Amino acid sequence: MRSDEGRPADPAAPHGRSGASTAAEPAAGAEPSAAPEADRRGAPGLPVQVRPLSGAEARRVPELWNAAWAHLPTNPYPLAERLWRERLASRHHDPSLLLGAFAHGELVGYAHGKVPASPWQPAGVAWVSSLAVAAGYQGRGVGSALLDALLDLLTAAGAREVRFGSDADHLLPGVPMEAPPTAWRLLRRRGARFGALEHDLRLDLRVPLPPAPLPEGWRLRDDDPEGALAFVERAFPGRWAEELAAYVSGGATVFTVERTPAHPSGASAGAEGFCVAFLGGESVTSPGLHWSQALVREVPGGSLGAIGPLGVAPEVRGGGVGLALVRGAAEALHRRGVTDAIINWTTLGAFYGRLGARAWRTYQRAQATLPVVRSGGDV
C-alpha cells in the first residue's frame, strides 16, 4: 500500500503507515526565471514586494526561518545550513517557486513551493514546503502576500490541490504544532482542511530495549543494500524507492530480513523487508535528523541517530518481523554509540511505542483546493 502522495503505508504493522509552514540551486548571483515581481500590500502602510529569491538570497533562508521562531523560548525546528543546501540542490527544487517578501528593501519572509518532478507524484498536486516570516513582521500581512503569490504560481502551473508539507525532499510532514496562531489562521482563511497528526518519535537507547525477537526461520542482515533496493522497487515503487537509492548512495546502513532454509516456507529468494539506519555522518541528512540541533540542546552529550523508512512484505506483516527489524536497527545504532534515535514521520506511535519510542515532534496534515477562495483578513 502507498499513501496518495507515494509514501507507502507502514508495512511493519498489521495496519496503517510508518513513518509546513516548508530543489538545483541557481548559479551564484543568477536570478532564477519566474513570475514577475509583484507588489502586494500587507498591513496598512506596509508595502510588500514579493519575487523569486536570487541564489545568494536563497542561502539566507535558514537565518530567516530560525528567526521566525522568536515567539517561543527556544526554536524547536532549527534549520541547519547544510540541510538547506541539500534542499536547494534537490531535483524537486524549482528556483522560481522560492519566493521572498521584501519590506523597505529588507528580506522579511519567504515561501517555498514545489510541483511534481518524479513519475510517482500525483498530477494536479502541488506543495507549500515551508513558509516563514520574521518575528517582527508576523501578523502584518507578509505571510498572506507570500502565500497568495505562491498559490497563484502553483495554480498557473496546473495544480488543483495544494498540500502543506509532505513534499518530496521535505522539511516537514505537515504543519508543526508550534507554528504561531497567525499561521493557522492564514491557512484556514485560504481554505485549508486539517487532517491526521504525524509524529517524529524519540527512542532513548540508554535504557535496554524490550525483547522483540525475530520469529524462527528469519535472519537479519546489514550487508545487502542491493537486495533492499530490489525489494523496495518491487514492493513499494515510488517515493520510498527514490529515497532509498539516495540514502544508500549517501552512506546509510540498510538492514534487511529474509527467510532461512529453516523457515517452514523455505529460504527467501531475496529480502522481504528493510529498515534504514543513520549515524549522522552520512552525506545525506536523514529526515529523522532534520532538527538534530534541537535534540542536541535537549540531551547535551548525547550521540544522535535515526531510523526509517521501514517496510516489510504484506504477506509477513503481523508476525513480529517488522518490530524485530526495528529493534535490530536500534541495537546496531546503540552498539555504535548512539544514545538517542529519531523515527520520523509516523502515525504509529503505539507500534513503535512497544520498543519505548515516544512522541517528540508533532505535525498536522493540511491541504486546500486550488484556486483558493480567500476569506478573512491578512496575517
Image (cartoon, helix red, strand yellow):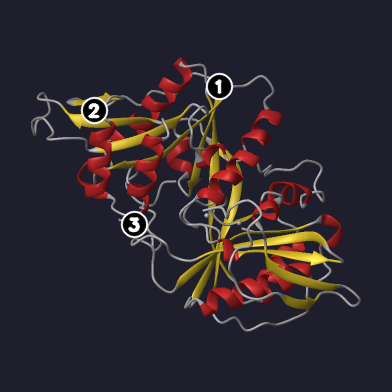
Residue at image mark 2 = 215
Mark 3 is surrounded, within 10 Å at the Cα level, by few (under 14), some (14 to 19) or many (20 or more) other residues, namely: some
Residue at image mark 1 = 339
Q: Residue furthest right?
A: 45
Which residue type carries mark 2?
A: Pro
Q: Percent position (x, y) of residue 88?
A: 56, 51
Q: Nearer the viewer, residue 93 or 375?
A: 93
Which residue type carries mark 3?
A: Arg
Find residue 304 and name its label: none
Query: Which quadrant of the structure image shows residue 38?
Result: bottom right
In which quadrant will I find the N terminus? bottom left
N-term-proximal mark, 3 vs 1? 3
Q: Taking 330 as reference, is 178 above or below it?
A: below
Mark 1 is surrounded, within 10 Å at the Cα level, by few (under 14), some (14 to 19) or many (20 or more) other residues, namely: many
Q: Taking 44 as reference, is 83 above or below it?
A: above
Q: CA distance from mark 2 to mark 3?
A: 26 Å
Q: CA distance from mark 3 to mark 1?
A: 32 Å
Q: Which is in the foreground here, disc 2 or disc 3?
A: 3
Q: Nearer the viewer, residue 41 or 143?
A: 41
Q: Percent position (x, y) of residue 190?
A: 65, 76
Q: Horizontally, is 27 left or right of 297 in the view? A: left
Find out whether the residues at labels 2 and 3 contact each other: C-beta distance under 8 Å: no
Residue at image mark 3 = 2
Find out whether the residues at labels 1 and 2 contact each other: C-beta distance under 8 Å: no
Query: Would residue 320 be visible to someone looking at this image?
Result: no
Query: Would residue 94 be visible to someone looking at this image?
Result: yes
Q: Secondary structure at mark 3?
A: loop
